Image (spheres, rainbow, N blue to C red):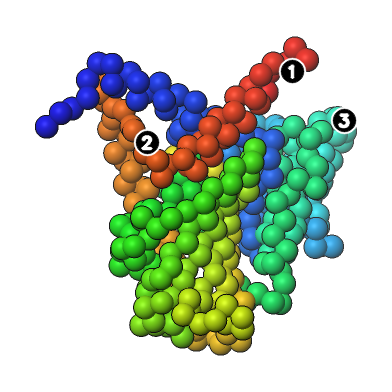
Amino acid sequence: MSIPTGNLITQARKASEPMANRDTPFIYNEWYVAAFDHEVGRHLLARRLLDRRVVMYRTQDGEPVALEDRCAHRSFPLSRGHLEDDSVVCGYHGFRYDQSGDLTQVPSQKNCPRGIGIRRYPLVRQGPLLWIWLGDESLADTGLIPRQDWIDDPAWACTSGYFHHPGNYVSLHENLMDLTHLSFLHANTIGTPDYACAPYKLDFKEGHYTLIREVVPTTLSPVWGRTTGLEGCTTAARIATSEFLSPALHRVSVTFYDSAQPVEGREQFHIRTAHILTPETLNSLHYFIVHGRDFARHDQALGEFMHEQLFAAFNEDVQGLGALETALDDRDEQHYEISVASDAPAVVTRIYLKKRADAERQPRNGQVG
Ligand code: FES
Ligand SMILES: [Fe+2]
């Protein structure tokens, strides 16, 4: 057995240097999903996002609000206070903040200090998702939200779910850009053995990386075979497009059909999944998922079967990457990683994430961050 030493380890480490990893600082100047719209109501919802404490609620008019979850007086978490009309009242000494985050009342005195408040974060609803901007507010252009209008389109039947994921968001992006793992990590759910070596095409544009994998002919795993009626068909086609759309979003679109049918008029089945990644800390993230199909849209039992099967597969990623994180906790001075040809989409994605993170730390106008 040969274990690389000296130069080889140095080379492997050098090759990994430009890539983001679990120690790379967050990218703040970006829209992230803070919550599903239905989670935010007339109560105080605390959530840690990119290592910031945030509290969310909805005004009486239905507007979602996100504030810093820290009182300006003695840093008590505001989420432990209560809502009064559209204001948050701190649960420690009763300081009151309006929906802009401005301090409006100090109960122990007549006068309220002026110009004091806590940070309010832009929070924008798009369909079932609430997008938040935690970075430089002057750059918070809502046109930059990677909108997914199909999620709200009746042409798609969608279900959604959430995992609290015990890993770094970079490794989940990498997992999503590397579909060779389907044959192994998902051998018992959505993967088939031919998936890992199927031909693929790549399309890389700065910040938008696409991997198209064509598995033709194939037999479909039960979740797709049973729901498309192609179960047992040995000439099925599975064309999967994986796209990195932003540090917060990855989309997988898959088309299924019977490749033995004439191209003209053959029935096609489409599914899409929005994998929504919002870092919580450097080793945990909020993993929101919306999955849609454009067939059997009104078949509830089929929708439930698909949801259950798919989320069992996503849980394999969550558990697997959690285990990977633990292994990385135990790395020693001999630690190194190597990349192979099929890692190309993941590598460009990680290089991009690193560049974005580094760019935010460049001094601007004499300031950092
Ligand atoms: S800490 Fe909030 S009022 Fe004192
Ligand atoms: Fe996976």
Which amino acid does the dot numbered 2 rest on?
Ser
Give the mark nearest the N terminus, 2 or 3: 3
Asked whether the viewer can see residue 3, the reply is yes
Residue identifier under label 3: 114
Labels 1, 3: front one: 1
- Rendered residue at 18%/27% (across/down): 3
Residues 250 and 229: in front is: 229
Could you say whether the residue bearing mark 3 is in a helix, strand or loop? loop
10 Å neighbourhood of mark 1: few (<14), some, or many (≥20)?
A: few
Tell me, for residue 339, which label it has, or none.
2
Residue 133 in the image: above or below residue 8: below
Could you say whether the residue bearing mark 2 is in a helix, strand or loop? loop
10 Å neighbourhood of mark 3: few (<14), some, or many (≥20)?
A: few
Residue 265 in percent (x, y) is at: 61, 83
Could you say whether the residue bearing mark 1 is in a helix, strand or loop? strand
Which amino acid does the dot numbered 1 rest on?
Arg
- In the image, the residue with mark 3 has its CB under 8 Å from the nearest atom of ligand 1: no
Task: Give how far apart the Cα atoms at labels 2 and 3 are.
Answer: 56 Å
Labels 2, 3: front one: 2
Residue 297 in percent (x, y) is at: 61, 83
In the picture, measured across the screen, residue 356 lies left or right of residue 254, that is: right
Give the mark nearest the N terminus, 1 or 2: 2
Give the mark nearest the N terminus, 1 or 3: 3
- Rendered residue at 34%/51% (across/down): 320
Tell me, for residue 76, which label it has, or none.
none
Which amino acid does the dot numbered 3 rest on?
Arg
Residue 241 in percent (x, y) is at: 54, 58
Residue 35 sits in which quadrant? bottom right
Residue identifier under label 1: 364
